[in-house]
Amino acid sequence: MKRINLFSIMLLMLIPAQAVIAGATDDAQGINDRIAVIEGLAGPEAVHWDAEQEIWFVSNFNGDASGDANGFVSKVASDGEILEREFMTGSDQHPLHGPRGMRIAGERLWVADADGLHAFDRRSGKQLEFIDFSAFEPGFLNDVEIGPDGAIYLTDTGNARLFRIADGEITIVADEELASPPNGVVWDPVHEALVLAPWGGGLEFLGYRPSSGEFVDITTLPAGGNMDGLEPWQGGLLVASQHDQAIWYVRDGEAEILIQTPGRPADIGLDASGRRLAVPYIALDRVDLWELPDRS
């Protein structure tokens, strides 16, 4: 089993990046094109849109992501106003340590954390359930997605694994099959597969099809590295690349940088319109909102 050091992951996420990176196209957006800035956060790692409530959820490390019982999820208005900074914190028995990727299923917001998965009522913020992963000795549980089979899928970047959770049972569906440790995960309707973002120097995106259990090649970026969040968009994929501080758009083998970010982008979020993108930066304690161009 491939393992990467947890400290190395955190160090790359937390060191502020240089603001000027080569490789952006002339029409790529820059810092002056932001439509809103969400400040007052504490190590924001992921953003997820709630379409019914028209709000953003923002997960915050707020210190040591591996176990200081200090993390929280913020509730933020669509325009970037923080409605409740510490909206979800977990319970006394199972507090949030360093919340990461999030995904809504029904009335629940599933949140990945250092030692497992939390389920919160997305309207009240109350913790409803905790799934303990300590028996699997997780390296760095990272991102969450709901598959077409209704199961929950969770990446472990530290140990290069993909988990499946269904009917209370946890199984490992991928480890040695992965050429790069997976970071972000998202269901891509075009390829009918769960797409895994490669952490490290890998540029190849692998897909997993729950219906058959097979792995398929999705796409390859021409540059970048340390890929984090990704979202399906206009028939392709939006990808956050930390190495070159960029939001890439790739479709049908063509790739371009849409946004040159001022810091290392983490787990991005996209609103229901498909035009507003939220980009969190752990080291900058901030989330930026951008208006995406039309690429339909």
Image (cartoon, rainbow, N blue to C red):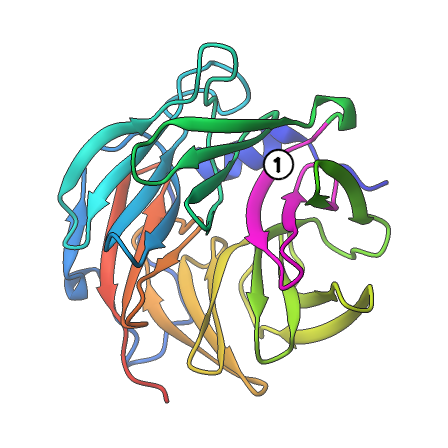
- Secondary structure state at the residue bearing disc 1: strand
Span highlighted in magenta in the image: 138-163
Q: Is residue 117 above or below residue 223?
A: above
Query: On the rendered image, what quadrant is the N terminus found in?
Result: top right
Residue 223 forms part of the magenta stretch: no
Where residue 275 sits: x, y (%)?
27, 72
Is 99 placed left or right of 141 in the picture? left
Q: Quadrant of residue 146?
A: bottom right
Say which amino acid is labelled 1. Leu
Is 258 placed left or right of 97 in the picture? left
Where residue 164 sits: x, y (%)?
72, 47
Q: Nearer the viewer, residue 100 or 262?
A: 100
Where residue 121 sits: x, y (%)?
39, 36
Would you name the residue on which mark 1 appears? 141
Query: On the rendered image, what quadrant is the C terminus found in?
Result: bottom left
Q: Quadrant of residue 158?
A: top right
Q: Is residue 28 above or below residue 156?
A: below
> Can I make out residue 285 in this image?
no
Residue at the image position 49 percent from the left and 61 percent from the top: 230
Residue 144 forms part of the magenta stretch: yes
Is 120 placed left or right of 226 in the picture? left
Q: Nearer the viewer, residue 255 or 56?
A: 56
Residue at the image position 23 percent from the left and 55 percent from the top: 54
Is 26 placed left or right of 111 in the picture? left
> Can I make out residue 248 in this image?
yes
Q: Residues within 10 Å of mark 1 (few under 14, many from 20)?
A: many
Numbered label tally: 1
Where residue 189 sits: x, y (%)?
57, 75
Residue at the image position 59 percent from the left and 85 percent from the top: 253
